[in-house]
Amino acid sequence: MSRAPSLPSHFSTVEQRSVANHLGLWTFLATEILFFGGLFVCYTVYRIAYPAAFVAGSHHLNFWIGTINTGVLLTSSLFMALADRAVKRDRRTALRWCLLATWLLGAVFLGLKFYEYGEKYHEHLIPGPNFQLNGPWKPQIELFIFLYFTMTGLHAVHMIGGLTALAWLLWQNHRGRLSPEHPAPVEMVGLYWHFVDCVWVFLYPLLYLIIR
Amino acid sequence: MITEEIIAPRVPAPAPTYLNAGHTLRSWLCTLDHKRIGLLYLFTITFFFVIAAVAAALMRWELLTPQPDLVTPDFYNRMFTLHGVLMVWFFLIPSIPTVLGNFILPLMLGARDVAFPRLNLASWYIFVAGGLMALYAIVAGGVDTGWTFYTPYSSTYSNGYVMMMAAGVFVAGFSSIFTGLNFIVTIHQLRAPGLTWFRLPLFVWSLYATSLILVLATPVLAITLLLIGLERLCGVGVFDPKLGGDPLLFQHLFWFYSHPAVYIMILPGMGVVSETIACFSRKRVFGYHVVAIASLAIAALGFLVWGHHMFVSSQSVYAGVVFSLLSFLVSVPSAIKVFNWTATLHRGSISFDTPLLYALGFIGLFTIGGLTGVFLATLPVDVRMHDTYFVIAHFHYVMVGGMVMGYLGGIHYWWPKISGRLYHEWTARVSALIVFIGFNLTFFPQFILGYLGMPRRVHMYAPEFQTLNVLSSAGASILGIGYILPLVYLTWSFFHGPKVSSNPWDATGLEWQTDSPPPEHNFAQIPVVTAEPYNYPPLA
């Protein structure tokens, strides 16, 4: 039982604060699951209703970008896990490189994602008045592509939040505020990062792999 | 609960309390004190309550006569939408949790604050931001979809400021999530030593169940409103059947949130009733464990019954049967609570103080509201009653007769703790009676109107319904007086009421062991709990 001078008065020990922070983050992640859950319900309903349109729509996605991005994101999660290990072993330099690698891989993911969005723009596949497509099932394929943009777009918004948090961690590490006694910020950002990663693990097969 | 003596240093100056800890506006707007944040919420939701009540008054005024003579149909639509949206999201859902929960929960746990005080303050700012967006939508021209934002009223055929209103609700939802998250972590982590789960007051149990719903249901509303916005922005058919979408999907998603949200609007009231019944009958709550678990059961079942709002939609009839059965099941934990409160009163030493009057009102009115809910959960009855005044009367019995009664009862019960002063007891008793009479006169005729077939959401009606409508409007004006009175005498009491000791009701519970009003950090020394709650001495 230790009591740090910076501890707010409503906590009696550092351990209590740490458990509280973890529980808070897990609760937040539960809300996130329900948030994305609504989208997954929409996806399921319309995929069952229009299987052919979903297959046709999936052909318009760039399989290779999706696959490479999956690898990129999983690798970034690996570095996040290594960062967690580094902070607990008090290796500040290793921590910095791991966080940097996580950040860069996250940025690569977003870069590829936005490149793919750009492709859709040039192919006139952005849902809305400029959406152009010949052949049957046009509104349903548009619906699929709309779901693609909404799901990956919300995922990307969460990634941007994660990158901001990682940048903040790098700053905290630079100021020497992370230590084996105070690893909570790394653990918390790590949990969040892995969660965002998990969402992609579901999005990738649902969007890219249904034609294979 | 028996606790160790709290030893505070004696000072000659007036005792430092959370109220005199700072007098500047900044000391209130930047406070991290859960008690001050509770009061910030109190002012905010009272403001929204008044606006929403004025809209209801206008509707009752229009309905005095069968002819449409006061407002245009379109204006009437905007009034009931305003009333619904503000009452649900900006008054009822935040009411007991953010005001009494914020103020009392940490005190009940023997804690110095909630787990995340900054998040707590942020939740209030977010709530205010959402509220301002909703107000803008109202002032700019209003919304006519009804509080449910059903498509295609809110999408293809929208003709109001739907998106601004929906955005306001979306933003306010984050405030709900933050409050729920904060309460869950606080209850898990900040209980005083010895305060085990089954020593928690039942108000804490009900807030815990409420918080679970807040964090698990609200995100689904968020994504649903977001999808409406994106559908309108991109012109795709998420909910538009012309473009391959399914309007029923909207209703499923909406009620997946909104039925649990209905229980956000009753569970905290049940918690208040448990506290006051025990205190004013000087007895342990009968079947404490079962009442505690019943709160969780209501929260859990609440997620499985949303389809009973959709019996007359094109939902599958088999789904309807299952939803009907599951809805019946909710009556089991609800009835357990009502029976156990009654058993607590039985052979108790009862004093009819104002908080108990509200609690008794709650029990009676909630029972009527709950039982008519069973009628509506019955498939063939619902087909007959759907979209009639019977539904209006049913949910007002639960939400106004239940939750608002619980809220007012709780405000009176904890008022000495919040303000450090007493209100005038007889004025309060009389106004509780006025609320009860006014409420029944307003809403009981609506059961009959609904049974006779008067549809809801219309500004004119057949002449034979007039007598009952006049009764209802008369009741509404009495109810209005019943709501204005506490506003007046509580405000007076806040500045001029006689000061009270730390425990004027002689109640158990840690919140009564610190000063009234409490000091800034609640307890000089964290109390240690050694006994179960409601440990009243045996009656002679």
Image (cartoon, coloured by chain):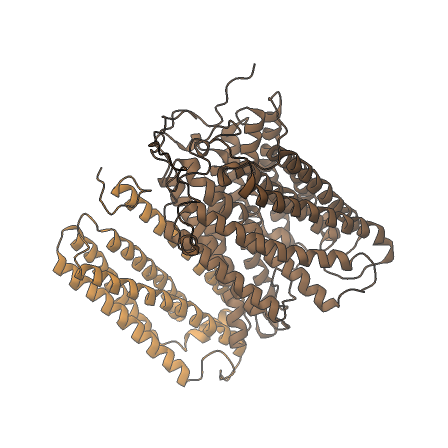
Chain colours: A orange, B brown
The image shows residue A179 at horizontal and vertical percentages of 17, 52
The answer to whether residue B456 is seen in the rendering is no
Task: Compare residues A76 and B44 and report the one nearer the observer.
Answer: B44
The image shows residue A94 at horizontal and vertical percentages of 13, 60
In this view, B36 is above or below A107: above
Position of A51 with respect to A62 (left or right) is right
Going 79% across and 55% down the picture, which residue do you hit? Answer: B454
Quadrant of the image containing the N terminus of chain B: top left
In this view, A105 is above or below B83: below
Direction top: furthest residue: B540
Task: Compare residues A145 and B301 and report the one nearer the observer.
Answer: B301
Q: For residue B86, what is the image quadrant?
A: bottom right
Going 56% across and 14% down the picture, which residue do you hit? Answer: B540
The image shows residue B13 at horizontal and vertical percentages of 38, 37
Task: Compare residues B540 and B370 and report the one nearer the observer.
Answer: B540
Position of B110 with respect to A129 (left or right) is left
In this view, B16 is above or below A103: above
Direction front: furthest residue: B12
Task: Compare residues A208 and B28 and report the one nearer the observer.
Answer: B28
The answer to whether residue B134 is seen in the rendering is yes
Q: For residue A160, what is the image quadrant?
A: bottom left
